[in-house]
Amino acid sequence: MYTLLLAVVAEQEHSGIAQMFDVGKSSFYWTLAIFLLALPFMWKMVFGPIVAALEEREDAARESARAAEAAREETERMKAAIQEDLDAARREAANQVAEAKIRASEREQELMSAAKAEAERERARAHQEIENSLASAREILRKEAVALAIDVAERVIVREFSEADQQRLVDDFQNEVAKN
């Protein structure tokens, strides 16, 4: 396309289109002078705000990075604190379980001791009842034996004893049996 345009321009060297593309040496200097005069204004009006916006954007990015790092550090610190609290809770739970086991064991020992003591008391009471029943039965047997002995003695002797004589004989017999 450019070659076509140059061909058209070459044919019409002095026509209006050719003059548009003919840049002389003075135009170059004028363009340079205008650029140098406009540069401070462009720097102030165009490049200044662009540079300020870029610096602001860079500062915001740095601040975001700092905030992200601070948040990460805070998260790590909170994670460590939570882990520490969790470990403390686990230790406390383990201690409570151990204490509960100890209390249960102590309570079991207390109950066993109380049951043994109760069984021993019950056995002693039963033994005492047996002894009392045995003593009562012996006393009844003695009395019956004395009464039987008196009956036999009355028949053998064939004489009648007075009530006082019978009582004296019963008391003597009981005393003799009690000694044996």
Image: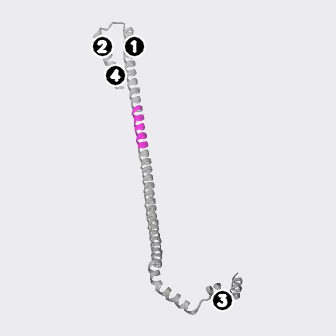
How many angstroms separate mark 4 from mark 1 (CA)?
A: 16 Å
Q: Are marks 2 and 4 in contact (CB under 8 Å)?
A: no
The answer to if 116 sits in the magenta stretch is yes
Magenta residue span: 107-122
Image mark for residue 176 = 4
Q: Are marks 2 and 1 in contact (CB under 8 Å)?
A: no
Q: Residues within 10 Å of mark 1 (few under 14, many from 20)?
A: few
Image mark for residue 14 = 3
For residue 93, above or below residue 36:
above
Residue furthest out toward the bottom: 25
Q: Residues within 10 Å of mark 3 (few under 14, many from 20)?
A: few
From the viewer's perspective, is the residue at label 3 or at label 4 nearer? 3
Residue that badge 2 annotates: 167
From the viewer's perspective, is the residue at label 3 or at label 2 nearer? 3
From the viewer's perspective, is the residue at label 3 or at label 1 nearer? 3
Q: Are marks 3 and 1 in contact (CB under 8 Å)?
A: no
**Kind of residue sitting beneath label 4:** Glu
Mark 3 and mark 2 lie on one chain; the one further toward the N terminus is: 3
Q: What residue is drawn where x is 31% and y is 18%? A: 172
Q: Residues within 10 Å of mark 4 (few under 14, many from 20)?
A: few
**Kind of residue sitting beneath label 2:** Gln
Element class at badge 3: loop
Mark 3 and mark 4 lie on one chain; the one further toward the N terminus is: 3
Locate the C terminus by quadrant.
top left
Mark 3 and mark 1 lie on one chain; the one further toward the N terminus is: 3
**Kind of residue sitting beneath label 1:** Leu
For residue 161, above or below residue 13:
above
How far across and down, in percent of the image, does residue 35 sit?
50, 86
How far across and down, in percent of the image, does residue 97 sit?
44, 49
How many angstroms separate mark 3 from mark 1 (CA)?
A: 181 Å
Residue 163 horizontal side relative to residue 61, left or right = left
Residue furthest out toward the front: 15
